[in-house]
Image (cartoon, coloured by chain):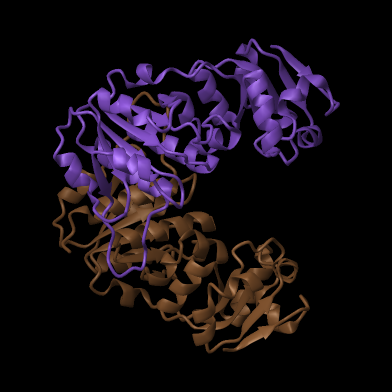
Chain colours: A brown, B purple
Amino acid sequence: MNVIEVDDPRDERLADYVRLRDVNLRRSLEAEHGLFMAEGEKVIRRALRAGFEPRSLLLTRRRLAALANVAESAAAPVYVVDDDVAESVVGFDLHRGALASVRRRPLPAADAVLSGARRVVVLEDIVDHTNVGAIFRSAAGLGIDALLLAPRCADPLYRRSVKVSMGAVFTQPYARLDDWYGGLDDLRGRGFRLLALTPGPGSVPLAGALAATGPADRVALLLGTEGDGLSSRWLDQADAAVRIPMAPGRDVDSFNVTAAAAIACYELVRDAPA
Amino acid sequence: MNVIEVDDPRDERLADYVRLRDVNLRRSLEAEHGLFMAEGEKVIRRALRAGFEPRSLLLTRRRLAALANVAESAAAPVYVVDDDVAESVVGFDLHRGALASVRRRPLPAADAVLSGARRVVVLEDIVDHTNVGAIFRSAAGLGIDALLLAPRCADPLYRRSVKVSMGAVFTQPYARLDDWYGGLDDLRGRGFRLLALTPGPGSVPLAGALAATGPADRVALLLGTEGDGLSSRWLDQADAAVRIPMAPGRDVDSFNVTAAAAIACYELVRDAPA
């Protein structure tokens, strides 16, 4: 067991964990070192089960017992600190008491995640990490074959996304499009029917649009940014605009993007062959 | 137009708006005065359209024009303040620039919202205001006939719930159960089939359970607290345990409660008669 007690919050060995709420710092630090943060026992265990390799773990003293078998089998150093040292390093009360700094892996190319995929969801510029995490959790839980992310979509491995996804970002196949403007051409070329989810005029109920495709047909559902929805470029590129039917008389004009994504993913896989 | 310029953040006329992030203060202040906060132009307009009466409005100078017609027709005073006065009163940068202090109305009895209802969702102790707001938005958007809230469920008219619901709390019929232990007896007595949503063992797919009931039958879906789910008391009381089918191999053991609620509400109304 590679357990190392650390008393000084400025100890260089804790550098991966500094100021977790400082978004700008974290973006550059994590990109430079190719790492991401997994927080809490459950999520850390899922990262390891998914084959990710930790650079190190940071545990508060009272969490060491709960994670003893992880600490024992980890090839990486396990830093054990007092609660106040943890708080001083990360910048808030680390009440879950467990963090892992985990090595990123190269993202697969779109080709790799699309091969064999029949039900795909494409996220155009979902910018909120909480929403990205929640969408991954629903997509993974329901068994969406692949997620594709537009270039400006938020990072699924950012700490908040990982946490909200409860680790679903580790098992849900996904890739990033490197071209927004022409990004959908490749999908169309592969025979995917492109359905744009939008409450706007001209859209037809999602269930009906799916019933018109065979369950073995390839379908890609396009989901737009919070607030403004899909860009006109992507709306134009889609084969059809689809919506989740809304009740009249409630003065509600749209769903929350994570609720819409959950319903859409559910509908996408409902009749899909196992 | 009853517009009143106020320069002093300590002005007693702004007392409804103080320290909006101080949960304990707000709970007692809002209960004592029978008010709730509506935030942002869209939500304020929805509150008024739903027939709620403002005690007053608080607008920053640059938002007055956008809400001029509301300000003109409001019988209540409209306080106009500079950005820094607003921030000093509410305790944060009021970037939406518009608040209304709105009179609460007595909640209807369960009897009133259940009369004629066929599709009902019952929330047992959802304690997070964000989740309550998100569930109301999905339920209202999809047309759930009524929501019933267990005694310890968070307040849908708390500022954060109102905001996340985008005003759906104004139009979605709901009532509060005043008895947790025996609260489901009344529903059963009215002929509702009680379906407990849980990923636990013994649960059957929700869609199948609904297919076994006629679309005109009365169904109440029970949704449990974040994390722990339904109490064993309510699980015991239900006619059947139902689940949203999950994909194997993704190491996901549950859905986020708002995603589960969205999917369940969607499934509940999917085949319901219009």
A166 vs A113: above or below: above
Q: Residue at x 62, y 80 (%)?
A: A32
Quarter of the image where one finds residue B213:
top left
A239 vs B80: above or below: below
Quarter of the image where one finds residue B91:
top right
Drawn side of residue A89 relative to residue A237, left or right: right
Drawn side of residue A2 relative to residue B185, left or right: right
Q: Residue at x 47, y 58 (%)?
A: A132
Q: Position of residue B15 (x, y in %)?
A: 76, 24
State which quarter of the image contains the C terminus of chain B: top left
State which quarter of the image contains the N terminus of chain B: top right
Q: How many marks?
A: 0
Residue A157 versus residue B225: which sits nearer the camera?
A: B225
Q: Position of residue A29 (x, y in %)?
A: 65, 75
Q: Residue at x 28, y 63 (%)?
A: B247
Residue A179 versus residue B94: which sits nearer the camera?
A: B94
Drawn side of residue A158 relative to residue A216, left or right: right
Q: Position of residue B90 (x, y in %)?
A: 74, 34
Residue A70 versus residue A254: which sits nearer the camera?
A: A70
Instruction: Please say whether residue B65 is visible from this viewpoint.
Output: no
Drawn side of residue A106 relative to residue A97, left or right: left
Instruction: Please say whether residue B93 is visible from this viewpoint.
Output: yes
A239 vs B193: above or below: below
Q: Residue at x 43, y 36 (%)?
A: B137
Q: Position of residue A196 (x, y in %)?
A: 33, 50
